[in-house]
Image: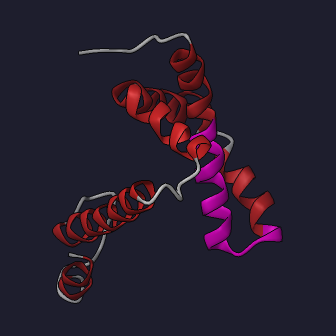
């Protein structure tokens, strides 16, 4: 699917904000590869349990993680992202600056989910 997404992007560009078909095919292929790698590592017991817990926290309250992401991004972080990007961009490449912002934002969303996970609070729909 990753290869199909890249080939399809020659005719239909990969645009995340529009969720073009090439983006969906590419991102689905990458997600499948990542999931297969994680499952393979966990099957051979080479995957650290602390890292598995990190992902388990997101999985236990996945819908709430999505809602928190939306609320935090548009409610809190949006005014600060350009200045943070400029600060990181002066020390890193643009790609690494974007990755750094995404990782920081993921940790901000993860913290309340981790507290909920330790208290065994699960948001169900």
* 119 falls in the magenta region: no
Q: Nearer the viewer, residue 110 or 90?
A: 110
The secondary structure making up most of the magenta span is: helix
- In the rendered image, the quadrant that contains the N terminus is bottom left
- Relative to residue 53, is residue 5 drawn left or right? left
State which quadrant residue 75 falls in.
top right
Q: Nearer the viewer, residue 56 or 98?
A: 56
Does 19 sit above or below residue 12? above
Q: Can you give x and y, in whole percent of width and height, for residue 108 in the image? A: 63, 34
Q: Which residue sits at x=66%, y=46%?
A: 104
- Relative to residue 86, is residue 27 drawn left or right? left
Does 69 sit above or below residue 49? above
Q: Which coloring applies here?
A: secondary structure
Q: Can you give x and y, in whole percent of width and height, for residue 60 in the image? A: 40, 27
State which quadrant residue 20 falls in.
bottom left
Q: Nearer the viewer, residue 28 or 88?
A: 28
Q: Which residue sits at x=80%, y=58%?
A: 87
Q: Can you give x and y, in whole percent of width and height, for residue 88 in the image? A: 77, 61
The magenta-colored residue range is 90-107
Q: Which residue sits at x=48%, y=12%?
A: 120
- Relative to residue 34, is residue 14 drawn left or right? left
Q: Which residue sits at x=67%, y=57%?
A: 100
State which quadrant residue 112 falls in.
top right
Q: Can you give x and y, in whole percent of width and height, for residue 25 in the image? A: 20, 69
């Amino acid at each position: 699917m990753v290869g199909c997404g890249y080939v399809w992007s020659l005719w239909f560009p990969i645009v995340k904000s529009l969720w073009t078909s090439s983006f969906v095919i590419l991102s689905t292929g990458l997600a499948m590869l990542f999931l297969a790698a994680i499952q393979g590592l966990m099957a051979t017991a080479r995957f650290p349990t602390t890292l598995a817990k990190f992902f388990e926290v997101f999985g236990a309250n996945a819908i709430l993680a999505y809602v928190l992401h939306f609320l935090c991004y548009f409610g809190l972080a949006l005014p600060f992202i350009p200045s943070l990007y400029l600060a990181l961009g002066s020390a890193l490449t643009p790609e690494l600056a974007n990755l750094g912002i995404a990782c920081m934002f993921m940790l901000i969303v993860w913290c309340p989910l981790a507290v909920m996970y330790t208290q065994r609070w699960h948001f169900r729909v």
